[in-house]
């Protein structure tokens, strides 16, 4: 009846308004567009099936889009968290590396400078001690040469004086012997003569004793010079041994620190490069999330509403089909279509479409021929 059709229109209009559905509005327009005598039902029902298929497709796409957004955001936010952790670790590592290089107390630069200063002081000490030792050796050699020369002079003096005083004593004794032989009786000695005559030997011996004392003192000085020189040379050699060992140890330590510095600087460059790369990757992820944000926010925020609207649309379409199929116009149109399909057999089939004469006509065979193949058909 027209009442059912009007009810279908009202229902579609109400559903279109409540769900804000353009699809239901277009269907309502299609339903209202039929002219008198025109049967719009096939177009309407085809449009309804197409709309329902579209609703199902959109529902599937929305679900997939929502799932993708949620998964993509979960993955990307996890990546951002991981990158943030990596950046924190890299900054910490860079701070540690910079401190190991530049710390004013324990940094490699300070320790290398200290070793270089220590090595410079060591080499300076070797140079100064060697120069001092050479000066001391030169002074020692000059002193010993002077002492040896002085000893030669003193020894020569002793020899000359000893020979001189012996010759004088021998000459004096010879002269005294001649005088005594010329006088048989010895004259009375002078009052000042109290002992035997000893000649000049006593005075000579005193001079020689002084020279011998000087010689001994010179020999002692030479021995002392030798001893002092040996001790100084030994002290120098011991000091040089210590300085050379310190030089080697310092050079090895310096080389080790310089190697560590080079390795640390290289590691620092690598860490900074990795930090820049990681920050760039994090920034790319953040920009990517910003890029997908509008679409993902829309589908996530409106998914429930869209699902509800689709359900309303589907229900409205199904109810519209039910209401439309209950109208006499639909029944009449359907009957007319069936009659048109029957063609020349319409008059036969209109009364009893299930009987053999209708079936045989439609199959374009005789009734007996049809019944032979379908004996259970009514009226066979």
Image (cartoon, rainbow, N blue to C red):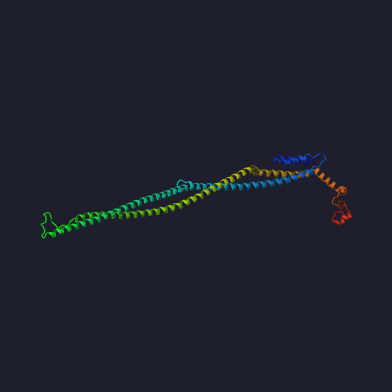
The residue at the far front in this view is 182
Residue at (71% x, 43% y) in the render: 313
Residue 112: where, in percent of width, then height? 46, 48
Residue 354: where, in percent of width, then height? 84, 51
Task: Tell me the quadrant of the picture where the N terminus can be found.
Answer: top right
Residue at (48% x, 50% y) in the render: 258
Residue 77: where, in percent of width, then height? 60, 46
Residue 262: where, in percent of width, then height? 51, 49
Can you see residue 233? yes
Of the pair 276 and 299, the residue shown nearer to us = 276
Task: Tell me the quadrant of the picture where the C terminus can be found.
Answer: bottom right
Q: For residue 26, which quarter of the picture? A: top right
Residue at (71% x, 46% y) in the render: 57
Of the pair 131 and 376, the residue shown nearer to us = 131
Of the pair 140 and 155, the residue shown nearer to us = 155
Q: How many marks?
A: 0
Describe residue 260's horizontal placement relative to residue 157 as left or right.
right
Describe residue 44's horizontal placement relative to residue 300 as left or right.
right
Can you see residue 11? no
């Amino acid at each position: 009846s027209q009442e059912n059709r009007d009810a279908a229109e009202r229902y579609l209009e109400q559903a279109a308004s409540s769900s804000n559905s353009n699809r239901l509005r277009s269907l309502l327009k299609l339903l209202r567009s039929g002219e008198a005598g025109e049967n719009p039902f096939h177009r309407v029902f085809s449009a309804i099936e197409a709309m329902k298929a579209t609703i199902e497709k959109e529902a599937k796409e929305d679900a997939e889009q929502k799932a993708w957004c949620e998964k993509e955001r979960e993955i990307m936010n996890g990546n951002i968290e991981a990158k943030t952790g990596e950046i924190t670790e890299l900054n910490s590592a860079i701070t540690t590396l910079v401190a190991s290089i530049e710390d004013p107390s324990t940094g490699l630069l300070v320790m290398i400078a200290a070793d270089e200063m220590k090595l410079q002081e060591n080499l300076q000490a070797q140079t100064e001690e060697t120069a001092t030792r050479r000066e001391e050796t030169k002074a020692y050699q000059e002193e010993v040469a002077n002492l040896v020369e002085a000893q030669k002079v003193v020894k020569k003096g002793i020899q000359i004086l000893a020979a001189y005083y012996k010759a004088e004593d021998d000459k004096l004794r010879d002269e005294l012997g001649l005088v005594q032989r010329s006088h048989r009786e010895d004259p009375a000695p002078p009052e000042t003569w109290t002992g035997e005559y000893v000649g000049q030997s006593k005075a000579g011996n005193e001079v020689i004793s002084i020279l011998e004392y000087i010689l001994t003192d010179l020999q002692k000085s030479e021995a002392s010079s030798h001893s002092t020189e040996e001790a100084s040379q030994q002290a120098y050699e011991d000091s040089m041994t210590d300085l050379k060992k310190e030089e080697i140890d310092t050079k090895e330590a310096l080389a080790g620190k310089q190697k560590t510095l080079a390795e640390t600087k290289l590691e620092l460059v690598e860490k900074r490069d990795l930090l820049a790369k990681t920050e760039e990757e994090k920034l790319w992820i953040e920009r990517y999330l910003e890029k997908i944000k509008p679409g993902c926010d829309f589908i996530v925020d409106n998914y429930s509403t869209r699902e509800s609207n689709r359900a309303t649309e589907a229900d409205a379409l199904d109810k519209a089909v039910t209401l439309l199929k209950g109208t006499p116009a639909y029944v009449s149109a359907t009957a007319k279509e069936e009659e048109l399909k029957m063609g020349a057999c319409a008059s036969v089939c209109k009364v009893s479409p299930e009987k053999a004469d209708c079936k045989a006509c439609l199959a374009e065979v005789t009734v007996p021929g049809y019944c032979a193949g379908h004996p259970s058909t009514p009226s066979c």
